[in-house]
Structures are given as C-alpha cells and as structure tokens.
Image (tube, rainbow, N blue to C red):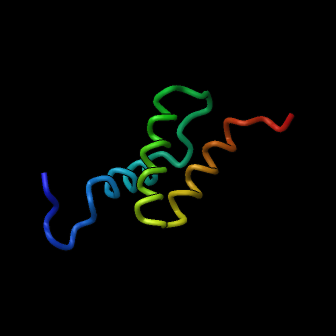
C-alpha cells in the first residue's frame, strides 16, 4: 500500500508510534523487543534521524547490567 503524498512512509509511522507508546520496551528481554529494535534500526539507517538511534540505545542500555 502506498502512502499519500506528503505522508511519512509506513515504516516511519510505525516506529514513531512505538516510540510514543512504549518509552521502554520492557523490564525483561524478549525476542519481540529485538525484532522491534531491529525495525527501528532500519528506520534510523534510512532516515538518519538521531531519535531512532537514541531510542535503540536507551532500550538496549536498560537490558544490560553494569558488571
């Protein structure tokens, strides 16, 4: 399905929706979080917008313990 002129691509709309709804994906790592973050990584690579990288980093950091 194509976007209407002037609309963001679906991938960007979905990534923005996820970021808005879930600031932190969860408290325990799950496969689904990896899939979501990989999708956001692809949006970041396509757009170059820092907000996508920041979201990935913040969520990844929340799963990694400092040891």
Residue 63, image quadrant: top right
Q: Residue at x 60, y 44 (%)?
A: 59
User: Seen from this angle, which residue lies furthest right?
Assistant: 67
Q: Residue at x 39, y 52 (%)?
A: 15
User: Seen from this angle, which residue lies furthest bottom?
Assistant: 6
Q: How many numbered discs sit on the rendered protein? A: 0
Give residue 36's position: percent from left, percent from top.
45, 40
Give residue 65's position: percent from left, percent from top.
78, 35
Check the picture and name the quadrant holding the C terminus: top right
Relative placement, left or right, of 27 versus 67 is left
Give residue 32's position: percent from left, percent from top.
46, 30
Give residue 41's position: percent from left, percent from top.
48, 50
Relative placement, left or right, of 2 versus 44 is left
Q: Residue at x 27, y 65 (%)?
A: 8
Above or below residue 30? Residue 14 is: below
Q: Residue at x 41, y 60 (%)?
A: 46
Residue 28, image quadrant: top right
Above or below residue 59? Residue 3 is: below
Above or below residue 24? Residue 48 is: below
């Amino acid at each position: 399905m194509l976007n209407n002129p002037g609309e963001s691509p679906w991938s960007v709309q979905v990534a923005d929706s996820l970021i808005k709804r879930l600031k932190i994906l969860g408290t325990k790592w799950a496969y689904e979080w990896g899939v979501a973050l990989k999708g956001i990584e692809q949006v970041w690579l396509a757009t170059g917008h820092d907000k996508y990288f920041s979201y990935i980093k913040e969520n990844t950091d929340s799963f990694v313990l400092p040891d």
